[in-house]
Amino acid sequence: MPSVISVVVVYSSRLCLRIVYFDLVFTDKYTNTYINVYDCVGIMTDGLAEIVKSFDKRDYRILVGIEVAMKFFEWVPVTEISKYANLPSSEVTYRLKLLGKSDLLQHTIHPYDGYRIYFNGYDVLALYTLVARGTLAALGSIMGVGKESVVYEAQDSFGHSVVVKMHREGRTSFKQVKRSRTHLDGVRHFSWIYAARLAAKTEYDFLVQLYPKVSVPRPIDQNRNSIVMEVAKGWPLVSVKLENPIWYFDEIVREIKNAYNLGFIHGDLSEFNVFAHDDGVTLIDWPQCLSVGSEGSDEVLMRDIVNVTRFFKRKYGLELDAEKTYQSVTDPIE
């Protein structure tokens, strides 16, 4: 069997450094659980763990209150936050200032005094819930940052290595995200919270349907903008030198066909979201997945195949026919 003979780019160590362990220690009337950090080894690279460590159940209620009210307000007034959180306005005002200092909220005074959740705040709510469910026991450092997501190393309640992918759709441009995301088709108005949550749910649902017939990371849990999944085996195709590149190309085509036979097309396939290992390949990053037969799906499938064939030609000099590869993928199962 071919092997990956050299790694060009090495990611952060898998759960060896900067890991924070969580424990459930008292109850909250909204979720019947609350998180407290009882042991911290090292410091998170973006300070998220320290925020969770100091998180109070009243802070959680305030953030959830803003989250719910953002369905109706672009900027949520303090009176509405107080109502949703069931806390006095004076206490809400005090805690909003503290949460703002942690970069969990955005604040405006025009056209009125209001607040909305910022990305870190939504991350904290998702992390809080995943730990409360028993899905996560520890969070490590950032493994990678993409245009629309951040990936953390983590551990589940059994001590197994997992990753947490936090979607950030809408961080740069709502219009660009809406154009590139079919799951937002027909949505007239949406906030980045809606876009990020829907992207995470969409990707998680696709992974559930694909695994294990297609080589994708095993999905474990999902909340808000976050997905917990197993660690992808191997290394990104772009970062390795392959001993037998044609064998790996055939493996990629086989997984594309497996997905196609289940009725799905990746939609954004490239050398950056294919992991190569001694047993084959694993395809990651499925938020732009399309259903076979949906509008434009044939063109998207061809684009995926062209991306892969061009990479193997550019890096390894392989002469590959994208049209024939497309035909082999779309031919009925014998």
Image (cartoon, rainbow, N blue to C red):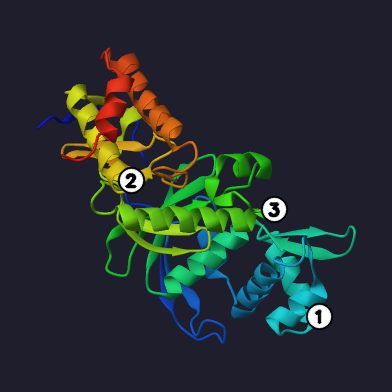
Dot 1 lies on which element?
helix
Comparing 286 with 83, the one in front is 286
Q: Which of marks 3 and 2 precedes in the sequence?
A: 2
- Of badges 3 and 1, nearer the viewer stands 3
Q: Residues within 10 Å of mark 2 (few under 14, many from 20)?
A: few
Q: Which of marks 2 and 1 precedes in the sequence?
A: 2
Please identify the residue farthest to the left as the structure is shown: 1
Q: Residues within 10 Å of mark 1 (few under 14, many from 20)?
A: few
Please identify the residue farthest to the right as the structure is shown: 111
Q: Position of residue 229 (x, y in %)?
A: 35, 56
Q: How far apart are labels 2 and 3 at the CA level?
A: 43 Å
Comparing 62 with 249, the one in front is 249
The residue at the point 55 percent across, 64 percent down is 124
Q: Which of marks 1 and 3 precedes in the sequence?
A: 1
Q: Report the disc number at residue 13.
A: 2
**What's the residue type where badge 1 is placed?**
Ser
The quarter of the picture where residue 51 lies is bottom right
- Of badges 2 and 3, nearer the viewer stands 3
Dot 3 lies on which element?
loop
Residue 75 visible in the snapshot: yes
Which residue is identified by label 3?
A: 188
**What's the residue type where badge 2 is placed?**
Ser
Measured along the vertical axis of the image, is residue 269 above or below residue 202? above
Which residue is identified by label 1?
A: 90
The quarter of the picture where residue 236 lies is top left
The residue at the point 68 percent across, 74 percent down is 65
Q: How far apart are labels 3 and 1 at the CA level?
A: 36 Å
Q: Position of residue 85 (x, y in %)?
A: 69, 80
Q: Position of residue 242 (x, y in %)?
A: 22, 25
Residue 18 visible in the snapshot: no
